Amino acid sequence: MKNFHDEYNRTKDLFENKMLAMVGEAVYDAPEILTKAMRYSLEAGGKRVRPVLMLQVAQLFGTTLENVFPLAVALEFIHTYSLIHDDLPCMDNDELRRGKPTNHIVFGEDMALLAGDGLLNLAMETALKGAENLKEDDLKVYLQAMRILFTAAGVNGMIGGQGVDLLSENKDIDEETLHYIHTHKTGALINAAVLCGGILAKIDEKTYSILQHYSDVIGLAFQIRDDILDVQGDPEVVGKAIGSDLANKKTTYVTLYGLQESERKLKNLEEEGIRLMNQLDCDTSFLKTMIRYICQRDQ
Amino acid sequence: MKNFHDEYNRTKDLFENKMLAMVGEAVYDAPEILTKAMRYSLEAGGKRVRPVLMLQVAQLFGTTLENVFPLAVALEFIHTYSLIHDDLPCMDNDELRRGKPTNHIVFGEDMALLAGDGLLNLAMETALKGAENLKEDDLKVYLQAMRILFTAAGVNGMIGGQGVDLLSENKDIDEETLHYIHTHKTGALINAAVLCGGILAKIDEKTYSILQHYSDVIGLAFQIRDDILDVQGDPEVVGKAIGSDLANKKTTYVTLYGLQESERKLKNLEEEGIRLMNQLDCDTSFLKTMIRYICQRDQ
């Protein structure tokens, strides 16, 4: 395989250009300041882990990326809106995100709220546009992927996890509750990224269940690494304040199991992810390095 | 035609039962308080003008209502989320809606924000579920209606209108700006209600353009009546404080043209709507009485 980071950045750049072009096409009759607020958070950077995962999985199983972009872009719109709303004063009240002032600090709470609503709605518009001109079989497959994406984003998925997370602040929560938060708040969209990529490539059931397992592993690993970075990350690199979980008295993997146990768990997940990818008879080197990257990232 | 109000209430009751049943099916893994918050605003009543319009138009042109319910329910989810977010302290900061405490007064700002996000996402999930098991031709028509609905709900529609409305507070705005706010903030979803009903019934182009005109008329009439009710409505009946537009120094039809001119405009729209319905060679008596009802409603 080409160097992982080259391939990652190639996919990321391809995606970002496509995403910003799609925003340009999709927004034609909105107030300028609202458009600016949406673009501000979309252009604030970020790792684009979810769309890169979706595009790489789809590519691995032989889909042309053109068919995947609309859902990959919709996914990033959903992720971005959730960050804008999470940062609002009535939620986590964060003033810094990816090293930049959060949306409501720049545009005000009211515009930030609308920018978030606008991005979630734009996710649906963009996904629907991708369904245009698809022939019956491809259309059925595409709609199946759309259902997986928007179910993962909803109250039975990401929003539900956000809700339980809010209800758990300043409380000691048990393992089961933390598991719900992790699998829903972060895990659901990462699962959807991997599974939508596979579904659009029309993979068989055996491959699907391996990818499902892989996406659970990578989703949990992503969250545990997040929890570790919150206690030992470099604020300059992470791009936000460190220790905010502690400050908000949040139960995390680290507060529940301690740093050493969390790192051991992370190592196991890394091995598990690689073991799963070895079960597929195609070149999964990117997805193997991906789980390693997720487990070792410093931002 | 049967008595208008009997027919209206029959459709409304049918719709509300279907909507609450669909929420029950769609929400299965969300925190209880979040589900309660969403249900609270869905069950807070309201006229259900939009779904009733969609269902009646679809019925008029011969569609079985079963095929229309998913989009009608999605539309009411969208309308309801927009009210929850509009009422938030960072927006209109309203404490009373339909005679009841607003969502954030009962459940807190953070849950109200998530309940709104959850309802918008649920609108997409519900609309997508309605696309399951449709054969190719019906599916293409259904997706066309979905695109109209979610475009109307987005930043080029309702959310854009909300944005311009916010930017216009405490400002004297011109006719063009007020027109943008009216056609986008309120008009867009009412247009979508009428047009989706027609599209699902596979109407011809001539009928479509008449319905499009009718939906513009009814949307504008709805907003002008709202502006009039804000200055001369009975708070007990309207279910919210009167004079809030004046208090927020909002430019409305009444502040721009005066009460008398607004009422004259409303009368013209009523006649225009009836004239348009007379161009259709089917029994449009419900839609004729509907425009009269919109223009004369006291809540």
Image (tube, coloured by chain):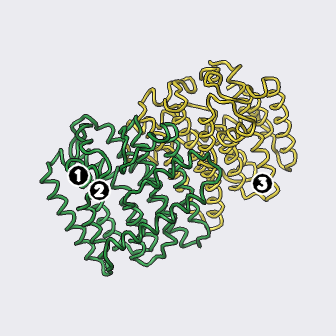
Chain colours: A yellow, B green
**Which residue is the site of mark 3?**
A208
Of residue A239 and residue B38, the one placed in the foreground of this image is B38
Q: Amino acid at mark 2?
A: Gln
Secondary-structure class at tag 1: loop
Of residue A85 and residue A119, the one placed in the foreground of this image is A85
Q: Amino acid at mark 3?
A: Tyr
Residue A125 lies, with reference to residue B134, above or below; the image says above
Q: Dot 3: within a 10 Å radius of its alpha carbon, few (fewer than 14), some, or many (20 or more) residues?
A: some
Residue for point 49% across, 63% down: B71
**Which residue is the site of mark 1?**
B233
Q: Amino acid at mark 1?
A: Gly
- Point out the tag, 2 or 1, that comes first from the N-terminus: 1
Tell me whether the residue at label 2 lies in contact with that at label 3, contact meaning CB atoms closer than 8 angstroms: no
Residue A29 lies, with reference to residue A143, above or below; the image says above
What's the CA distance linking mark 2 and mark 1?
Answer: 8 Å
Q: Dot 2: within a 10 Å radius of its alpha carbon, few (fewer than 14), some, or many (20 or more) residues?
A: some
Q: Which percent across, then down, holds residue B47?
A: 36, 60
